[in-house]
Image (tube, rainbow, N blue to C red):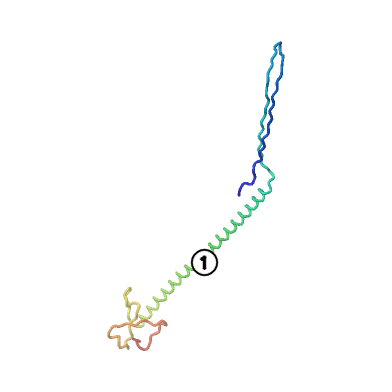
């Protein structure tokens, strides 16, 4: 906000010269004399309507800016909370799917009578059923997505 109130300056003064004869205690004197005065006045107007209007407008703008800032903070907090809940839900989903996958592998290996070594590349596959012609060569087949054994190996 700029300062719209400007000071009011006033400069006034007077000067005078005189001459007089005077006798005092039997002494006579003659002389000239001068009188002068200089006045400087500076004042601010206390009833400036523009200043009060600017101040009121600035206060309204400040209140609006604070409200908007608080609204943004609330929206961001809500978004962060929702994202944290989504991340937690995804972690739980991954844990449940991992557990379901482990249970499924255990069931398949129990049904075929083999137990895969942990970390081996064939642990993701199950052994072929004994009726498969490829069982003798040691090939493996991928488990179907529905978890059911087919009638043959499908290779």
Q: Which residue is mark 1?
A: 82
Nearer-the-camera pick, 126 or 112: 126
Residue 27 placement, left or right of 67:
right
x and y, in percent, of residue 27 in the image: 70, 12
* Secondary element type, mark 1: helix
Nearer-the-camera pick, 140 or 63: 63
- Please identify the quarter of the rendering in which residue 116 is found: bottom left
Height in image: 97 above or below 58?
A: below
Residue 114 placement, left or right of 74:
left
Q: Residue at x 67, y 27 (%)?
A: 36
- Please identify the quarter of the rendering in which residue 5 is found: top right
Nearer-the-camera pick, 134 or 43: 43
Q: How many marks?
A: 1
- Please identify the quarter of the rendering in which residue 136 is found: bottom left
x and y, in percent, of residue 135 in the image: 30, 85
Q: Residue at x 67, y 24 (%)?
A: 34
Farthest residue, direction left: 137
Height in image: 35 above or below 89?
A: above
x and y, in percent, of residue 86 in the image: 49, 68
Residue 117 placement, left or right of 28:
left
Instruction: Assign the C terminus to one quadrant of the image.
Output: bottom left
Height in image: 46 above or below 82?
A: above
């Amino acid at each position: 906000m700029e300062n719209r109130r400007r000071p009011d300056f006033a400069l006034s003064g007077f000067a005078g010269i005189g001459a007089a004869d005077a006798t005092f205690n039997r002494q006579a004197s003659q002389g000239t004399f001068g009188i002068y005065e200089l006045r400087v006045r500076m004042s601010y107007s206390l009833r400036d309507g523009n200043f009060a209007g600017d101040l009121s407008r600035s206060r309204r703008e400040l209140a609006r800016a604070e409200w908007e800032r608080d609204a943004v903070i609330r929206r961001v907090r809500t978004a962060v909370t929702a994202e944290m809940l989504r991340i937690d839900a995804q972690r739980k989903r991954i844990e449940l799917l991992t557990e379901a996958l482990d249970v499924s592998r255990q069931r398949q290996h129990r049904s075929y009578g083999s137990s895969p070594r942990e970390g081996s590349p064939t642990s993701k596959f199950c052994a072929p059923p004994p009726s498969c012609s490829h069982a003798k060569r040691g090939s493996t087949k991928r488990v179907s997505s529905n978890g059911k054994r087919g009638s043959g190996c499908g290779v």
